[in-house]
Structure formats: structure tokens, C-alpha cells
Amino acid sequence: MNVGILTFQSANNYGAFLQAFALCSTMNHFEAVDAEIIDYICPAIENDYNPKKVLYRKGNKIKNTIAYILRKNGINKSALVFNQSRSKYFITRHSRVSRNELAELEKDFDLFIVGSDQVWNTVLTENDHTFFLDFVSNSQKKASYAASMGDVSFNDENSLPLKNELESFKYLSLRERESTDFVSSLLARDDVVTCIDPVFLISGREWEEYISTPRENNYLLYFCIGFPMQSTLSFAEELARKEHKKLLLLMDKDVPYKYVGITHLRGIGPMDFISYVYHADIIVTNSFHATAFSILFHKRFYVETVVKRRERIINLLKVSGLENRALVNGKVTQIQNQISWQDVDNNMKPWIEHSLNYLESLTMPR
């Protein structure tokens, strides 16, 4: 069975890269499956990682120009390491596919899977209907895996277009329980399921194959999406001092002229990212995927929950039984060092098995 995966494969984002890699790798472990990532060009996603994007922001043009000059080398270096990683780790036989070329791919694949990123967040994709597999005429070939709508909420006015997009899917899986319930009700279907993020489909021991040893040791890693919240940064700084750890700052879009008193990690590729998580003594983050890999690698961590798209982080903490690792504006009820990882693994096991069973069901003869 030839399987084509449609996701945000071109985003220079650790979570986007690692979930795409994990989903494709998992599919290729099933018998008689040949899966690849379709290198589709989504203009909105491509533009989001354009170094010149900062020039067109609202506000003072001079400040924007200075910010661009200061950030462009870092952004270009990040793009380089991500492109190198895609070349090394992604299976992609259909490269740089445009919207006009998609229809020609249907004959090459027995199944298309869209997910697991925010592929149905129409604000993020600027209403790109490709991620609803509208180019696929055979509904038997249409499946989703842990697809997300992000923060988008649907009302009576815009739920009808969504219904029209999704009712042709043979198989439907979403990432958030709330979205699953909404789509089930919208389509009057009882076979819509919630599945776990693909990075959990590969065990922590299996991820170790991709781990390297960083130059730094004895450190607290603070990985941040966007700009650090001051209260969370203060928590990380104080914890690093208390534990006698070096504080390392890794940002998804580094701003080298800020937080000059902290060591910035720059030009870090996706597998280097998980290596830094693996070797960290403590992780503080506001990121879902840094939290996910902290769980996979049994690392002591704290995650800020006052963030956008907080539902998936909170849901992961509930599922794993790690609600006490949550920060609220940089505060935690009690600093707890001990985690019962056997209990965590037992909590996660049914969700992982359920998700693997769903994917395996997609490969069954029809």
C-alpha cells in the first residue's frame, strides 16, 4: 500500500518536523506499507518562516529593519539545518509539489493521511483547502490522523463549510477531544476518534537512536515558543541557581539581542533539539513537544500552561497523570523532584496502543 502524508513538513519548527517524521516512520513499520511525506508547498506556511516577514510587521519600519538585520543570519542558519534534516530523515519522492500538481498524485497512492499538526486551522493555512484533501476524488483514500483545528472555534455560520469538507473522509482522527466531539456531532458519526501525537508512537528507547551528545552538560534547558514570559523565565533562572545548573535558552525563533545574560542555543536541528532534551537535568518550557519528549525520556520538567493552544498541553498532563508539572504564570504549587515514571508509562500505554491500532486499521485490505 502506497501512503502519502500531507502535513506542515516545510515548517522550520521542531514539533512540526518531529511529528511528521514519527508518523511516516510509524506507517512504514506496518507490513506492506510504503509511506512518504508529500512535499506540498503551502504559501502561508512557507511565508511564516521567511526571514523578511519581520519587515512587513505593523509598527516602526526602522525598528523592523533593525530586527530583520539582527535576526536574518539566525533564521537563515535555522532554515539550513532544517533543510539538511529533511534531506536526511524525510522520505519524499514528490518534491515541491504545487497546488496545480496535486490532482496528478491520486493515481500514485492508495491512501492519503492528513495530520497531525494544525492542518485544519484555516487561519494558519489562510484557508488552504488542500489539507482537507479536496484534490482526492475517491473518499476511500481519505484519512486524517490527530488533525487539529488549533484555536479556531466554529459556529453555525462556518460549521457548514467544515461539514462539507470532512463528510467525504472515510477515516477521521483528531488530536483534541473537544474537536473530536464537535466533528462527531457535526457529521453525525460515531467512528471519529482521538489519537495521540505521533512522537509518542516511537518509544523513548527507539528515539535514542537519533540522540547525540551536546557540548554542554549539567544544565537546565529552557525551550520557549515565542518570547519567554517573564514569570516563567524567572522561575527557570531561580531553579537553575538553586540546583546549580547552567541555564540554556533555546527559542523556536531566536532573538539574539534579547536575554543577553543567558546562553542562547542557535542553529539547532530537530534531532539536536531532542538530544538537548535527553541530556538535560531539568526542562522548563511552554512547548507541547518539549513536554512530550520530556515524558518520553523520563526527564524532570515544568511546563507553562498560560499559553495559546493550552488545551493539548493540559490534556497531555491529565492523560499522563503529571498535572503537578504545570506552571501557571511561572508558579507551581510545590517543587517536586520525584516522578513515578512507571505510573506515567502505564497511563500513556492505552492511548499509544489505541492510536497504533487506528493507524494499522488504515492499512487493512478494503
Image (cartoon, grey):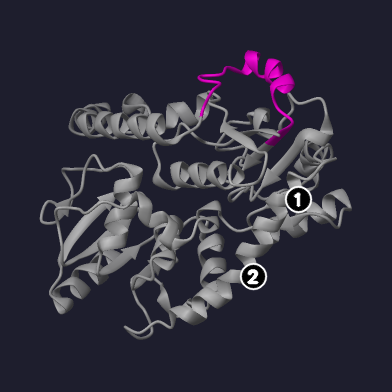
Residue at screen point 50% across, 54% down: 199
Instruction: Say few, some or many: other residues with alpha carbon within 10 Å of mark 2 (under 14 / 14 to 19 / 20 or more).
Output: few
Q: Is residue 287 above or below residue 8?
A: below
Residue 6 belongs to magenta span: no
The residue most toward the front is: 31
Point out the stretch of residues depicted in magenta: 92-112
Residue 32 percent across, percent down from the top left: 67, 39
| Residue at the image point whose x is 73% and y is 41% from the top | 143
Dividing the image into 4 quarters, which one contains the N terminus? top right
Task: Please give the count of numbered marks on the rendered protein.
Answer: 2
Residue 186 picture location, percent across and down:
83, 50
Q: Residues within 10 Å of mark 1 (few under 14, many from 20)?
A: few
The question of residue 93 being in magenta is answered with yes
Residue 361's label in the rendered image is 1
Image quarter in which the C terminus is found = top right
Find numbered disc 2 in the image and state the secondary structure of the residue it sits on.
helix
Kindly identify which residue carries mark 2: 350
- The tag on residue 325 is none
Q: The disc labelled 1 sits on which kind of residue?
A: Ser
Q: Is residue 337 left or right of residue 249?
A: right
The residue most toward the right is 188
**Does 366 sit above or below residue 244?**
above
